[in-house]
Amino acid sequence: EVCGFSKQDTVSTAGLLKNRKEHFGKNLSISYADPIPMDRAAFQYMYDTKGNTFLDAYNNIMLVGHCHPRVVEAGRRAMAKLNTNTRYLYEALEEYSSALLARFPQKLNKIYFVNSGSEASDLAIRMAKYHTRKKKVAVLDSGYHGHTQTGMQISAYKYQNPGSEGKPEETLELSLPKVFGSPWKDDGTAGQNYSREAIEKIQQTKGEIAAFIAEPIVGCGGQVPLAKGYLNAVYPEIRAQGGVVISDEVQVGFGRLGEVFWGYELYGVVPDMVILGKPMGNGHPIGAVVTTDEIAESFGHGPEFFSSFGGNPVSCRIGLAVLEVIAEENRQEHAKNTGEYLKSGLNDLRNKYPVIADVRGHGLFLGVELTNQDGQPLTKLASVLKNELRNQFVLVSTDGPFDNVLKIKPPLNFNRENSDELIFKMDMILGQNIVLF
Ligand code: PMP
């Protein structure tokens, strides 16, 4: 079974697609014009049922690599020994919470384990409301924080969609403080202008905001780093009117950004709450809210907090193994070095093809925005590039309000040779298709 191909080989892609149609709603989306029947994966590579090898430049969840043997073994052993819940005492919970909290500044010293990023954002908002006794939540345009009822209400990326109910009254939407596509530079002027506008909107609510939630680099918005100085101005304003600030580290956390372990560190700020998910369990479903004594104290006066699976010993052992592998394999430093190398290759491509209007991001969390000379989004070209890369066995995604930003966020095993391959194939595809745009 390990060396050969599984039984799935005999199942046709058409058969799998037919099954999907029969069993699922049509808003269960699928990647690529030519969907891939996946069979297995290892580190930065994925293998389909036909025996093709794909380079994964896309999956930020598999932080230390698909099916990393240390992580798999940790899960396997834990599952064979004990799986229970946080109403019992067990060492795995103590060891993991200590190891994870050691990664945060001292004031962030309480943790709540859940099972996904969505659950983490939902819980964080509930805690913030409980703590502040306020109701409104300030969010960024194009942000995404989860698929629960609350998650959808605080995710402009979703409530702005046709077919959605629109922005709820309790949500205060602030402009996305982006630099590319704005009239300002990242020398502080963009941050000043966006934060001035945000502060005006915050002040108009007259102290009703429980929480401000934002990603340090807005993934679904198209890999948009926040303008310099923005959080430094907005965090104090939210706190001054009695609210708390939340950093959504679900996509960017755990060293992916290279120079920092957590995204908020890019801006020299410390939030009151952090939400974690995706890479935390390297594919095993875990999430968490990390917060302060004060917020935990207020929340502690509420009903019991309990999640059947959150913080179970299997999840804790897996999470601990992920932290150990990041440290032992120097994955953060590797993300920094490889990210710089890849970014420089992407910038060379940008010099060659003016349709690459912007290359941005940190470490191995990068975005490539495609526009024409007038700054209009090249959505079709982004789709061609994504699908042709897939046909050339390299996986990336697209996102942003116009779906014209290539997202590159691979497992952190992704190396220089892989970067060369991605650049080479992008070059080839752009060269072949550029006449069309
Ligand atoms: N926050 C961010 C920034 C995310 O990207 C996501 C998932 N795309 C979530 C929260 C929700 O995480 P999950 O899908 O694991 O519930």
Image (cartoon, rainbow, N blue to C red):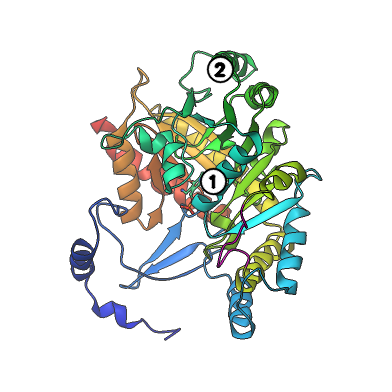
| Residue at the image point whose x is 56% and y is 35% from the top | 214
Q: Residues within 10 Å of mark 1 (few under 14, many from 20)?
A: many
Q: Is residue 414 visible?
A: no
Question: With respect to residue 330, does 173 lie above or below?
Answer: above
- State which tag comes first along the sequence, 2 or 1: 1
Question: With respect to residue 86, does 157 lie above or below?
Answer: above
- The image position of residue 115, as x and y in percent, is 54, 60
Where is the C terminus found, in terms of image quarters? Answer: top left
Name the residue that disc number 1 marks.
121
Q: Which residues are magenta?
A: 303-311
Main SS of the magenta part reads loop
| Residue at the image point whose x is 25% and y is 60% from the top | 24
Q: Give SS at disc 1.
A: helix
| Viewer-nearest residue: 430 or 142 | 142
Q: Quadrant of residue 342?
A: top right
Q: Is mark 1 within 8 Å of ligand 1?
A: yes
Name the residue that disc number 2 marks.
194
- The image position of residue 52, as x and y in percent, is 35, 68
Q: Decide: marks 2, 1 in contact (CB < 8 A)?
A: no
